């Protein structure tokens, strides 16, 4: 191990940089290098030669020197001494862009989607002052007037020799960063649109809308990661009802330049979905058909706020896409509007005496259900499920509860197996049947 600790490594690197660079940029490069490696895991860097540490940081520095406003840069390469001045057994991904939320998680998600593994990750954030053309004027590790924050990522993955795959990965990472930038840039606008939707429902002055209004406010108050927004109108075409995008209403990942409008601009809905759309419930709470490229690699949550004409007919929808925040999955159920009213209805339907053992058992079952089920399911399937699970406590049997998503895109399956019969083999058999 050539270095005693991270401080000794950085000191050695600084001396080496001064021996290699004699122009005015040397102090800025040293500052860049010090911060570049200071958050790295020392055990991953300890056996790297000083030449390779210098080569890696110099390569990223050269990429960092120019960055047009609002743009991002990505470079993917296999370091070679003759070509790059340093070497590594890994493929290296270098990224430079204005700092914003979700960068590292989103890039890592996309790398993992390719079946690749991060071997090393460096993610320093710098305060930067550039000229109008994006050329670096000055660098700082602390906030300064006239400076803005920029993220730098150095990621090493298992070595890739397939040039076509590297090009494809680079294109995918640019698209992910495009989504991240759109979502974060339009975040406050999406929140404003949610405020408008809340005001419109409030102005209707209907007592039955109070819980839906409070649910939307709960989302707005930090329980939802807003990724996109768009408005749709309900139209009839060839005896079928569906949605038509209202142009120039898209925000975040639903900007018209990202989520392109179909040529016919018609998104048909099934007859069952149309019936739900025309029900009294003012909200559509379900899952989108696409997975998020931002923050978490899961199917996005879909919150639709119905739009009405003067006669009360549904004529469109304000659609929010995003992800429930982590706090939405950990807070007490009785603090969540709509969910708490569902629980109250379930208890009333059960006709159990307050504080009875059976009621406590029912509440235990409700609390053990996946939270997404409580958000999305209406009373009927929830009642069937919790009552059925309660009955299972007295029986040693397997039971499956099925719920069809409102648009028919998904089926939710909850499988209950007696503890004594559950093991890895039985789980794999169940997965093989269902998936």
Image: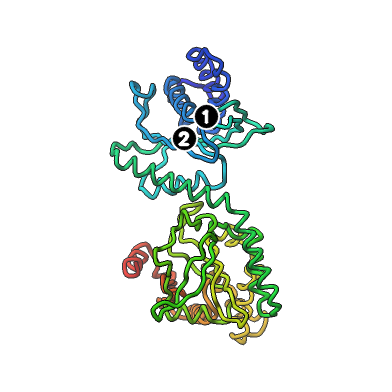
Is residue 64 left or right of 167 when viewed as pictured? right
For the point 32% across and 70% down, the residue is 433
Query: Residue 178 appears at what percent x and percent y?
Result: 48, 47
Is residue 359 left or right of 160 when viewed as pictured? right
Inter-mark Cα distance, 1 to 2: 10 Å
Considering depth in this image, is 231 or 223 the residue closer to the camera?
231
Is residue 201 visible in this depiction of the protein?
A: yes
Is residue 63 left or right of 196 when viewed as pictured? left
Picture disc at residue 154: 2
Is residue 69 left or right of 411 when viewed as pictured? right
Helix or strand or loop: what does disc 1 sit on? helix
Residue furthest bottom in the image: 351
Query: Quarter of the image containing the N terminus?
Result: top left
Examine the image and state in which quarter residue 427 appears. bottom left
Neighbourhood count class around disc 1 (C-alpha, 10 Å): few under 14, some 14–19, many 20 upward: many
- Residue 84 versus residue 315 in the image, above or below: above
Examine the image and state in which quarter residue 174 appears. top left
Query: Quarter of the image containing the C terminus?
Result: bottom left
Query: Residue 46 appears at what percent x and percent y?
Result: 47, 26
Q: Which of marks 1 and 2 is nearer the N terminus?
A: 1
For the point 35% across and 31% down, the residue is 78
The reply to whether callout 1 and callout 2 are in contact (CB within 8 Å) is no
Query: Residue 139 appears at what percent x and percent y?
Result: 60, 27
Examine the image and state in which quarter residue 35 appears. top right
Picture disc at residue 37: 1
- Residue 83 versus residue 200 in the image, above or below: above
Helix or strand or loop: what does disc 2 sit on? strand
Considering depth in this image, is 32 or 167 the residue closer to the camera?
167
Neighbourhood count class around disc 2 (C-alpha, 10 Å): few under 14, some 14–19, many 20 upward: many
Query: Residue 161 appears at what percent x and percent y?
Result: 29, 36
Q: Which of marks 1 and 2 is in front?
A: 2
Picture disc at residue 208: none
């Amino acid at each position: 191990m050539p270095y005693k600790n991270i401080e000794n490594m950085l000191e050695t690197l600084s001396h080496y940089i001064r021996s290699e660079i004699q122009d005015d940029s040397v102090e800025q490069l040293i500052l860049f290098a010090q911060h570049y490696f200071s958050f790295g895991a020392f055990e991953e860097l300890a056996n790297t030669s000083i030449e390779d540490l210098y080569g890696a940081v110099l390569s990223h520095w050269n990429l960092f020197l120019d960055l047009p406003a609002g743009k991002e840069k990505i470079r993917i390469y296999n370091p070679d001494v003759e070509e790059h001045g340093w070497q590594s057994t890994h493929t290296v991904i270098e990224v430079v862009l204005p700092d914003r939320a979700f960068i590292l998680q989103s890039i890592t998600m996309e790398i993992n989607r390719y079946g690749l593994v991060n071997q090393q990750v460096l993610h320093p954030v710098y305060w930067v002052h550039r000229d109008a053309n994006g050329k670096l004027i000055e660098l700082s590790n602390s906030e300064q007037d006239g400076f803005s924050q920029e993220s730098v990522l150095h990621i090493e993955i298992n070595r890739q020799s397939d040039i076509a795959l590297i090009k494809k990965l680079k294109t995918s990472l640019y698209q992910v960063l495009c989504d991240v930038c759109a979502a974060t840039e339009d975040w406050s606008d999406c929140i404003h649109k949610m405020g408008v939707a809340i005001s419109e429902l409030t102005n209707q002055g209907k007592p039955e809308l109070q819980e839906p209004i409070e649910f939307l406010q709960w989302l707005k108050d930090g329980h939802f990661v807003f990724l996109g927004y768009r408005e749709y109108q309900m139209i009839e075409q060839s005896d079928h009802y569906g949605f038509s995008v209202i142009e120039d209403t898209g925000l975040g990942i639903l900007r018209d330049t990202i989520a392109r409008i179909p040529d016919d601009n018609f998104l048909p809905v099934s007859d069952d979905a149309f019936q739900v759309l025309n029900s009294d419930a003012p909200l559509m709470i379900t899952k989108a058909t696409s997975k998020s490229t931002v923050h978490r690699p899961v199917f996005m949550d879909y919150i639709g706020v119905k739009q009405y004409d003067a006669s009360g007919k549904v004529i469109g929808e304000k659609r929010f896409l995003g992800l429930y925040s982590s706090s939405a999955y950990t807070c007490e159920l009785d603090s969540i509007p709509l969910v708490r009213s569902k629980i109250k209805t379930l208890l009333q339907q059960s006709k159990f005496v307050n504080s009875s053992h059976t009621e406590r058992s029912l509440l235990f079952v409700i609390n053990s259900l996946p939270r997404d089920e409580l958000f999305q399911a209406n009373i009927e399937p929830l009642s069937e499920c919790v009552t059925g699970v309660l009955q299972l406590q007295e029986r040693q049997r397997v039971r499956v509860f099925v719920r069809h998503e409102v648009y028919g895109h998904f089926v939710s399956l909850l499988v209950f197996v007696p503890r004594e019969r559950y093991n890895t083999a039985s789980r794999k058999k169940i997965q093989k049947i269902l998936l």
